[in-house]
Amino acid sequence: MKRRNFNLIAAATAVSALLPKAARAQAEPVRIGFLTVRTGALAAGGRQLEEGIQLFLKERNGSIAGRKVELIIADTGGNPAGAKTKTQELVEKNRVHVVIGPLAAFEALAIDDYIRQSRTPTVASSAAAEDLTQRKPNPWFVRAVGSSAQSNHALGDYAARVLGYKRVAVIADDFAYGHECVGGFQRVFEDAGGKVVQKLWPPLNVADYGSYVGQLKKNVDAVYVGFAGANGLRFLKQYAEYGLKTPVLGSQTAADEGVLRQMGDEAVGVVTGAWYAAGIDSPDNRRFVEAVNKEFGVDPGYYTLGAYSAGALVEAAARSLGGRIEDKEPFMKALRNPGTLRDARGEWRIDEYGNPVGPMYIRKVERRGGKLVNAVVRVYPNVSQFWTYDPKQFLANPVYSRDYPPSKNLEP
């Protein structure tokens, strides 16, 4: 019996050796490294990311392009060092074919050099750091979501031209994503005739917003909030507790569906700019929302669709190559040139820098059927990361930062 088993193994090995390299490779699963956050202020978004990719794979019975998928999930802890360490483990220990993630802009910036050096195809599912698809484009990086400022450009236009606001105060997380969201909003808002007259920058893990709420100017038309994770939830509660009635605008993560379900009346009326909303009235989105509701009992949000779309982008690229993703350069080229894609947000494509061009939604929080929802009040079609600006002129300016645009309009 032992001799017979040995002979069978030897025969199988010999046959395998005679198979073409591509055929042997496709016998292996597609290994996807998935960077998420399970602890800290960004954990709510991390949970949604995992729900999005799990639903995507479940709908495909764990396979894409005719190959089984091995999903390897890594918790970065929501910090740059953790993101870099986990990325290295996924690439060098787990030998992943592609990385999806990370969650935060500062994490994506932290792994940028390593991605370039290791030539690892990487698909951003939420990290929106501007320069990775602008002034310092990474050829091994592509986004399934918009850049930080992209939806905030649209919100700045809406605030000035539709709502008629002239003066806005800003409070936002003091990290790359917050800086870039504010910069995008301010640039378009001021180009349309408005003024940002105040900026407050609480740290990402601030314990209490009371002192910041007390500093907000009262003689403004609105307050723009640029928060991620649970920070929007905590800020809006304290904003209401202080009795402030000034209208609130915000980045899409400030009132994302992942935290909206934990909010109360303090969120009603908040207007945000986003590339996705669970309230999009289309057959594709209704199906997606129903699937997420059935599987997880919650509405999908920014992070949910981001991970789902990242999976769809990997699938489209793999299919175009007949499942042969081991050759990095053709695979990366396919990721950056998928043609027109369609998902719950609508139709979108990838520009020459690796960033999506697609619809941006202006949302308003309303209470419907006993729960809070982001109702769509305006759609901006085919929005580029450069808004309506000439790309060359846009890129000649510095990236949106804590001190950009120049603070000439700020008041003492």
Image: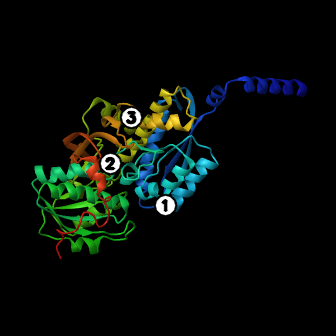
Distance, label 1 to label 2, CA atoms, is 25 Å
Q: Quadrant of the N terminus?
A: top right
Residue 265 point in image, percent of width and height: 22, 56
At a point 20% along the width and 70% down the height, the residue shown is 216
Splitting the image into 4 quarters, where does residue 369 fall?
top left
Rounded to the nearest angstrom, the CA distance separating label 3 from label 1 is 33 Å
Which of the two residues, 402 or 283, is positioned nearer the viewer here? Answer: 402
Lateral position of residue 247 relative to residue 72, left or right:
left
1 or 2: mark nearer the eye: 1
SS of the residue under disc 1: helix
Disc 3 marks a residue whose amino acid type is: Ala
Looking at marks 2 and 3 on the same chain, the residue that comes earlier in the sequence is marked by: 2
- Quadrant (top left/top right/bottom left/bottom right) for the C terminus: bottom left
Residue placed at 47% from the left, 48% from the top?
A: 101
Q: Secondary structure at mark 2?
A: helix
- Residue count near mark 3 (Cα–Cα under 10 Å), binned few <14, some 14–19, many ≥20: some
Establish if 127 lies above or below 15. Answer: below
Question: Which residue is pictured at 22% across the width and 74% down the height?
Answer: 215
Amino acid type at mark 2: Glu
Picture coordinates of residue 81, whole percent (x, y): 52, 62
Front disc: 3 or 1: 1
Q: In this figure, which residue is indicated by the disc labeled 2?
A: 257
Check contact, mark 2 vs mark 3: CB within 8 A. no
**Crowd band around label 1 with a 10 angstrom C-alpha radius: few (<14), some (14–19), many (20+):** some
Residue for badge 1:
80
Q: Earlier in the sequence, mark 1 or mark 2?
A: 1
Q: Quadrant of residue 141?
A: top left
Location of residue 200 with respect to 106 vertically, above or below: below
x then y, percent, for residue 2: 89, 28
Give the residue pinned by disc 3: 291
Residue 410 seen in render: yes
| Amino acid on which the number 1 mark rests in the picture | Pro
